[in-house]
């Protein structure tokens, strides 16, 4: 095997490994989120509670 061919193929393989590693790091960094602040948590709870109440009322009216 030609030495230049070997080095070229090894360099391409190394580049693929680096690209794969960077892609994995990017995917892992996307998974991290900052914790909710108190106001954000309160707003989220109020939205979910209002949706739950509305769904309960609709469910009760459809069963009656």
Image (tube, rainbow, N blue to C red):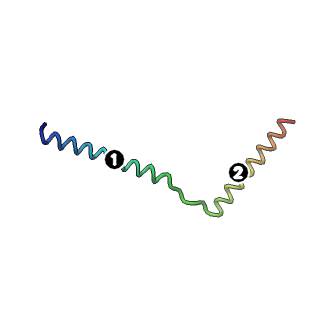
**Mark 2 or 1, nearer chain start:** 1
Tag of residue 19: 1
Can you give x and y, in whole percent of width and height, for residue 17 in the image?
31, 46
Q: What element carries label 1?
A: helix
Using a 10 Å C-alpha cutoff, classify the residue at mark 1 as few (fewer than 14 neighbours), some (14 to 19) or many (20 or more): few
* Secondary-structure class at tag 2: helix
Residue at x-position 37% and y-position 50% = 22
Q: Which of marks 2 and 1 is in front?
A: 1
Residue at figure coordinates x 68%, y 57% from the top left:
43
- In the image as oriented, which residue stretches furthest toward the right? 64
Residue in the image at 33% along x and 47% along y: 19
Q: Is residue 35 left or right of residue 1?
A: right
Please state the horizontal and vertical placement of residue 60, each as a whole percent of the image.
Answer: 83, 40
- The tag on residue 35 is none
Is the C terminus in the top left, top right, bottom left or bottom right quadrant? top right
C-alpha separation, residue under disc 2 versus residue under disc 1: 41 Å
Judge left or right: residue 8 versus residue 16. left
Residue 30 pos. (x, y %): 48, 52
> In the rendering, which numbered label is found on residue 48?
2
Please say if the residues under marks 2 and 1 sit with CB atoms less than 8 Å apart.
no
Which quadrant of the rendered structure holds the N terminus?
Answer: top left
């Amino acid at each position: 095997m030609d030495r230049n061919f070997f080095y070229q193929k090894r360099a391409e393989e190394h580049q693929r490994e680096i690209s794969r590693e960077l892609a994995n790091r990017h995917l892992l960094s996307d998974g991290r989120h900052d914790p909710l602040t108190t106001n954000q948590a309160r707003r989220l709870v109020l939205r979910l509670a209002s949706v739950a109440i509305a769904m309960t009322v609709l469910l009760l009216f459809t069963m009656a």
